[in-house]
Image: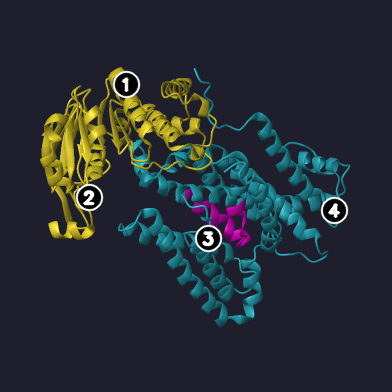
Chain colours: A cyan, B yellow
């Protein structure tokens, strides 16, 4: 008998992934204008376990920096980066298209229009912004899906992608128009478009968490179905899958997660496309591995990028969307070059 | 047993075939032949339940529309002419996908699923390839792996669209022999489409000639493969040789020397 083992992550790789994530989180918590030690961080985190008493060894100021400023920011980084990378992997699987990213179905353009409208109407720092961006993203994806699913002449995958292009173009034009009519808010709009974690507080983490949880649980549960879909619609159907329904569930989950994180963090590019491909180069193309690993890898990458954005040109902060592409692109090119031929 | 009644197919409002009826007995190997565009692949996909064309297909007395997609996939395995072999997927993972009809939506493989995948790797002699990336296999290796994936479904019926079209002569014979051995071994019902008439004649119990909107000839290779039938339906010049051991050999022959001669004939 041949020894048959499906692609599963070896325990040592789980360990590496956990160490990388915990390491970047600790880095994000301790490094900054005020340096903090790991024991201090530990004491503060333990002190916030319900029922525990506050440690006396850490000053109130340090505690506030850790618990009220850095910790929510790092947590949001993990949730945003993880969701974007995981959703990107899911989109690439479901559309069998390596260039698919979480913004494929017009989500970015829809969120952009929503955010611009909120800023134009409510002014800078509008409390409406996340809700408007979220609504815009969901509406754009729904319109794309309605158009793409209605045209059955070409393959449903290709027509969905094409209708996403059309919807994105239309919404971007609308967004640009609104932006030009309200040029005094240009700066605020750009700051959102370039992506930011700098304003993160616990309320942001709380608002995205339910959506991220729904998206992650759904995509993790359906990760094997993504492998079946890789065989093409016809063979997946022949293997007993209800392809249209499963594709809709996966797209809905990925879009919901993406829309939620975009609403609080703006348009952070690159994570959703590069992290899954990087992991593919190393671990192969099975979505059983790619879905969980993309979440961990995307989360760690965004926390690291945010750390760099904070410390690169103090006291100013770089927009995180600039960092993800500026650091991520050369790194990806390097891996692509070195792994070419070794693993396809 | 597969019973097909009054199947029709249209493509872009153009009728491909209509009222096709046929019966395939359990354990039989039927090969659908016919020129390009006659609708062989569409007919095979309809039998697999992958199209929603008018007509009825039933398996062991039950209409395939009444059976759930999963139950159908436990009975019928379908292999398209050029299956997608996703880069980066291992041969093992690919064969395990054949177990999908037996898993719940959220489930993963059990020990029994792994045992069956292992058995198929051995049965098709591809055990050495188990850890390989499926997109790096040669044509013959890939064909065996795809068959292993189909057999991992533990089907009663195997539907293969042009199983030998991408293979060299030796791999063609090898693949056909493997399919025949598996058929006899596991009492599989096999329906394939094929272009190579000699090869089809060597392995099929029965041939169905699909052309001009329907089944125009049906019978043993000896009955169907005549030079008149082939030249009429394929527009080809052939010589049909009856082999001493009962085989039928179809050889294309060249009569016109130039295109101009051919035009004159036409």
Which residue corresponds to mark 2? B37
Which residue corresponds to mark 3? A134
Mark sitting earlier along the chain (4/3):
4
Which residue corresponds to mark 1? B181
Residue A165 percent location from the top left of the image = 45, 65
Q: Magenta-highlighted stretch: main secondary structure?
A: helix
User: Mark 4 against mark 3, which lies toward the viewer?
Assistant: 3
Q: Chain of mark 3?
A: A
Residue A264 forms part of the magenta stretch: yes
Residue at left 48%, top 67%? A168
Q: Chain of mark 2?
A: B
Count neighbours of disc 3 (C-alpha within 10 A) and say few if under 14, some if 14 to 19, many if 20 or more: many
Which quadrant does the C terminus of chain A fall into?
Answer: top right
Magenta stretch, residue numbers:
A252-274
Residue A210 forms part of the magenta stretch: no
The CA distance from mark 4 to mark 1 is: 78 Å
Q: Chain of mark 4?
A: A
Residue A88 percent location from the top left of the image = 54, 51
């Amino acid at each position: 008998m041949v020894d048959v083992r499906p692609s599963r992550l070896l325990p040592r790789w789980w360990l590496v992934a956990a160490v990388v994530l915990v390491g970047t989180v600790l880095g994000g918590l301790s490094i900054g204008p005020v340096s903090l030690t790991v024991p201090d961080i530990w004491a503060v985190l333990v002190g916030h376990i319900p029922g525990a008493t506050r440690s006396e060894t850490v000053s109130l100021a340090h505690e506030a920096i850790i618990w009220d400023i850095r910790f929510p920011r790092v947590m949001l980084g993990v949730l945003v980066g993880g969701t974007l990378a995981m959703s990107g992997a899911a989109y690439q699987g479901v559309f069998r298209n390596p260039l698919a990213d979480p913004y494929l179905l017009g989500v970015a353009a829809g969120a952009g229009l929503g955010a611009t409208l909120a800023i134009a109407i409510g002014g800078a720092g509008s409390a409406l912004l996340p809700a408007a961006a979220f609504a815009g993203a969901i509406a754009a994806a729904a319109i794309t899906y309605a158009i793409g699913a209605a045209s059955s002449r070409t393959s449903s995958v290709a027509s969905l992608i094409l209708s996403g292009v059309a919807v994105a173009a239309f919404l971007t034009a609308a967004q640009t128009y609104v932006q030009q009519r309200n040029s005094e808010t240009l700066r605020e709009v750009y700051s959102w478009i370039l992506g930011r974690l700098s304003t993160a507080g616990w309320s942001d983490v709380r608002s995205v968490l339910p959506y991220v949880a729904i998206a992650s649980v759904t995509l993790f549960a359906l990760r094997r179905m993504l492998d079946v879909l890789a065989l093409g619609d016809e063979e997946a159907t022949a293997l007993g899958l209800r392809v249209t329904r499963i594709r809709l569930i996966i797209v809905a989950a990925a879009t919901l997660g993406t829309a939620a994180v975009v609403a609080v963090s703006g348009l952070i590019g690159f994570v959703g496309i590069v992290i899954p491909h990087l992991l593919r180069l190393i671990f192969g193309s099975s979505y059983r591995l790619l879905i969980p690993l993309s979440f961990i890898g995307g989360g760690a990458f965004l926390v690291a990028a945010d750390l760099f954005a904070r410390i690169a040109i103090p006291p100013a902060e770089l927009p995180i969307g600039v960092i993800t592409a500026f650091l991520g692109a050369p790194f990806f090119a390097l891996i692509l070059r070195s792994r070419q031929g070794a693993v396809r | 047993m597969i019973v097909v009644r009054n199947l029709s197919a249209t493509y872009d409002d153009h009728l491909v075939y209509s009222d096709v009826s046929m019966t395939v007995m359990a354990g039989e190997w039927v090969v659908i032949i016919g020129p390009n565009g006659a609708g062989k692949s569409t007919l095979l996909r309809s039998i697999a339940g992958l199209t929603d064309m008018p007509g009825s297909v039933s398996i062991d007395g039950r209409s395939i529309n009444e059976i759930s997609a999963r139950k159908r996939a436990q009975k019928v395995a379908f292999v398209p002419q050029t299956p997608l072999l996703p880069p980066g997927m291992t041969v093992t993972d690919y064969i395990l996908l054949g177990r999908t009809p037996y898993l719940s939506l959220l489930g993963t493989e059990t020990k029994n699923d792994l045992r069956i995948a292992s058995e198929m790797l051995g049965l098709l002699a591809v055990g050495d390839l188990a850890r390989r990336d499926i997109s790096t296999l040669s044509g013959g290796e890939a064909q065996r792996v795809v068959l292993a994936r189909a057999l991992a479904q533990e089907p009663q019926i195997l539907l293969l669209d042009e199983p030998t079209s991408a293979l060299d002569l030796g791999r063609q014979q090898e693949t056909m022999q493997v399919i025949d051995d598996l058929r006899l071994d596991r009492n599989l019902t096999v329906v394939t489409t094929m272009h190579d008439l000699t090869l089809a004649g060597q392995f099929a119990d029965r041939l169905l000639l699909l052309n001009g909107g329907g089944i125009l000839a049906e019978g043993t290779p000896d009955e169907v493969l005549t030079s008149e039938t082939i030249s009429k339906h394929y527009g080809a010049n052939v010589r049909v040789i009856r082999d001493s051991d009962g085989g039928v050999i179809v050889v294309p022959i060249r009569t016109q020397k130039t295109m101009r001669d051919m035009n004159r004939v036409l």
